[in-house]
Amino acid sequence: MNILLGILLGILKVLLLVLVLLLIIVLLLLAVPFRYRIRGRTKDGQFEVSASLSWLMHAVTAVFEIEKNGETLQKQLDVRIFGISLREMHRKKQQKKKERSKRRKKQKLDELKRQDPKQYEQMKKAALERRKQREAVAAEEAAAEKSAASVPREAEQTVAEEENLCSRVRKKLTETSGKFIKKLRAGFEKLFATFIDILLKAVQVPQYVSGKAAQLSGDAGRKITAFLRWAEFLTGEEFLTALSEAKRLLLRLLLHIRPREVKADFLFGLEDPALTGELLGIGCALGARYGDRVRLAADFEEKKLEGEAEIAGRIILGVLLCAFCAAIMNRNVRSVIHTFRNSVKEEE
């Protein structure tokens, strides 16, 4: 009995430890900020962009990079946990796997060479012959392609081929003539049946039109009623109050995730000098709050875009969760959601 109680107590301790660890991880996820940093550089039609997201003093970091060099576009994603790159680990694992397969193949060949030298020599000769055959086939295909590209193709037909073609055409015509007559007869019969059907439906047109008009009038009345109900709902005080509350929460979230560090140095030019001047004025007005960290210059003579930029900020999941809960717990928002669900159910 004491042994059983000890085992149960040990299991409870392990479960308690797991729950405490999960609680600590959840609290860290909610309280410790996620820091993001985005860098970009462009020049002469080439660009490179790097975006990183780190957490817990760079204990976990994810980096995504895009680089365009000429006509090639390269993308790569890397995740580092305590400085250990998962992409590098995967690359080393694949490399070790290839080296292991090469070693196994070499060991098998060495063992075969020791046990049966004749078979080893035969296999070696067969491999060399297969290699020579592949090279010969590749050379023949290359020569054929070269000759086909250099010599134009000319279609030539002999008298026998022409006679054979004429005989096949006559045979095909005799075979299809009977089928054509049958299809023509079936087409006339189908056309006559369609004409009779149209006459029968024409007799029923007045009754159909009256029924359709009644149906359309009923549908129009329901649609007008639904439109008036939705218009009253969207212009009501309850909906407007909920909308203002949602705007306030959205502004709060945007202020929270906004970049706290901004650096930019760009030289740009457009085809229209007037538009270039307008954009320069707007950019200077927007970048005035960052001071010397944002520098813009314009080229009024040619179209170009050169420079680099960097932004950084943080995101705290606890703040986002609190904002979401505040929006859900708001009385006006809940009332709007309830009214919207009831309206959708009534329409269905």
Image (tube, rainbow, N blue to C red):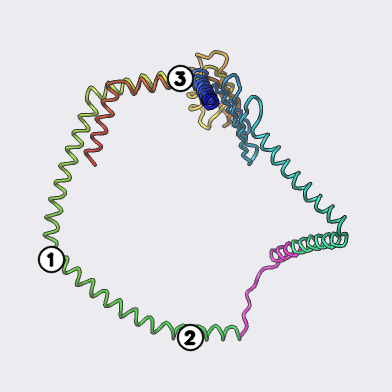
| 33 over 99 or under it: above or below | above
Q: Label 2 is placed on what type of residue?
A: Lys
Of residues 13 and 200, the one drawn nearer to the viewer in this rendering: 13
Q: Which residue is drawn at 23% across and 35% down?
A: 343
Span colored in magenta: 139-159
Camera-side mark, 1 or 3: 3
Mark-to-mark CA distance, 1 and 3: 72 Å
In the image, is 1 to the left or to the right of 112?
A: left
Q: Disc 2 marks which residue?
A: 171
Q: Quadrant of residue 336?
A: top left
Residue 65 position in % (x across, y down): 61, 32
Q: Label 1 is placed on what type of residue?
A: Val
Q: Any magenta on residue 161?
A: no
Residue 23 position in % (x across, y down): 49, 21
Kindly report the secondary structure that dominates the magenta region of the rendered protein. Answer: helix
Mark-to-mark CA distance, 3 and 2: 84 Å
Check the picture and name the quadrant holding the C terminus.
top left
Q: Disc 1 marks which residue?
A: 203
Task: Report if the CB atoms under discs 2 and 1 are less than 8 Å apart.
Answer: no
Around disc 1, counting alpha carbons within 10 Å, would you say few (fewer than 14), some (14 to 19), or many (20 or more)? Answer: few
Q: Is mark 1 on a helix, strand or loop?
A: helix
Camera-side mark, 3 or 2: 3
First along the sequence among labels 3 and 2: 2
Q: What element carries label 3?
A: helix
Q: What element carries label 2?
A: helix
Disc assigned to residue 318: 3
